[in-house]
Image: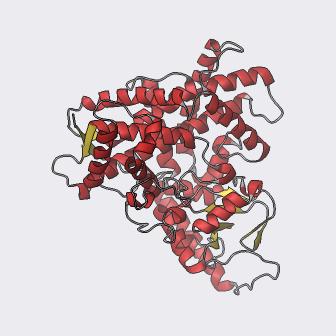
Amino acid sequence: MALLLLLGLLGLLGLLGLWGLLCTAAPGPSPASQWPPGPRPLPLLGNLPLLRASQQDQWLLELSERYGPMFTVHLGGQKTVVLSGYEAVRDALVGTGQELADRPPIPIFQLIQQGRGIFFSSGARWRSARRFTVRVLHSLGVGQGPVAGKVLQELASLTGKLDGFRGQPFPLALLGWAPSNITFTLLFGQRFDYQDPVFQSLLGLIDEVMVLLGSPSLQLFNIYPWLGTFLGLHRPVMRKIEKVRAILKTILEQRRCTTPRGGPVQSYVDALIQQSQIQGDDHQGLFTEANVVACMLDMLMAGTETTSATLQWAALLMARHPDIQGRVQEELDRVLGARRLPQPEDQQQLPYTNAVLHEVQRYITLLPHVPRCTATDTRLGGYLLPKGTPVIPLLTSVLLDKTQWVTPSQFNPGHFLDSDGHFLKRLAFLPFSAGRRVCVGESLARTELFLLLAGLLQRYHLQPPPGVSPAALDTMPALAFTMRPRAQALCAIPRH
């Protein structure tokens, strides 16, 4: 019934848009207009009739072929500027400083976080939260030896779980448990047993939230929040978010009872608690109860989903390309042998393994278009964009740029190797974005992914279940907030 109502309302909107188009003379460009070109919008609907909800990045790439590296699309009544290609995206993200460091007020995230937290906040509150988070992660050993030890501890737990399957098919999503637990350890100061009900509840809720955030109903909510509110399209995801918040508040209270004032900081939550004790309700609101929970929520959702999905993609692509997996294992055997665990410094001696991991991240484009927003009137690419203009730096267009990659649409580790087989850094490798909003967990993600993937391939052959060919493995992304792989199974066959 709800679906029929939704389709009926969308049909009504389409008729209104068509009526407006027929009754309105084609407007000429304003003499003062400095917007980039783009497809002509329909009244009320904008360019939505052209939009493919499940392939937005592909739709935007096709528009860039027609309108160039900088163009305007109308999402409903909202003008949005899209940047496409390495040159345009790099110049905007790296060259504009604070001018393009804000986030637009995306309705569903405004409803969830109300401008708090790290990832969808803006201005002074965002700068304070980011500085604090970077400082705390560094103090916890991110990018250094202490975190590598935690990753290898989690690798042992993961391989123990995989050994229990004795070479039989296991769900691909199981691989996400290890990076998720590493995030939990840094956030909460403790790792969880994989069967712990809190661990399982958080993973289940995060999965459900990510699927809901990528659904067409929430895309509609973000474009027409008044309609989405009337239809209650936000309610399912808000119910899940409240369950996550309840768990986070329980953990926060538990840590408050065990974290001595001025004692050693063992987690991100400890640092938030101690800083709130020192500063109280600071004038920027960073350490109020609501913002502390908002920062925890942001770190939890982003820190688990992105690395978890990337590791799953890496395993899936290794099973789909057994020849590439074999070359990685030859290199691991030569450098590490069968028993010595990988260490972060081994990356220099493992150029092919390093190239494969980089190619995984290039090929999948996990977060293809997280929008920015102009913090002031900003001149960009010869156009003057007014303050508050949403800007989409289309990372898909960078990671698939034909001028930067020899075979952009193919999985090819050679993109990151020179003619002598040495690892080759590429400026157009921007899966973590760039500039002031570059991913705060980039260093952690790099360490986790290298140690976990190298450790898994050192120990196992990853292959499809019996009766399934490598080419039959499904590499179409699932419909979610990130470009995560679809649910399926692999086998981990012990090598030694």
Specify whether 35 is left or right of 333: right
Q: Where residue 25 appears, x then y in whole percent? A: 70, 87
Residue nearer the viewer, 99 or 420: 420
Residue nearer the viewer, 234 or 279: 279
Residue nearer the viewer, 446 or 492: 446
Please identify the residue farthest to the left as the structure is shown.
Answer: 467
Please identify the residue farthest to the front as the structure is shown.
Answer: 420
The answer to whether any part of residue 457 appears in the image is: no
Residue shown at 81% from the left, 36% from the top: 284
The answer to whether any part of residue 196 appears in the image is: yes
Residue 419 sits above or below residue 355 on the image: below
Residue shown at 66% from the left, 45% from the top: 111
Q: Where residue 451 appears, x then y in whole percent? A: 42, 37
Residue shown at 55% from the left, 61% from the top: 428
Residue 289 sits above or below residue 315 on the image: above
State which quadrant residue 15 falls in.
bottom right
Residue 184 sits above or below residue 27 on the image: above
Specify whether 409 is left or right of 11: left
Count of numbered tags: 0
In which quadrant of the rendered image does the N terminus lie?
A: bottom left
Q: How is the image coloured?
A: secondary structure
Q: Where residue 398 appears, x then y in whole percent? A: 54, 64
Q: Where residue 236 appears, x then y in whole percent? A: 52, 44
In which quadrant of the rendered image does the C terminus lie?
A: top left
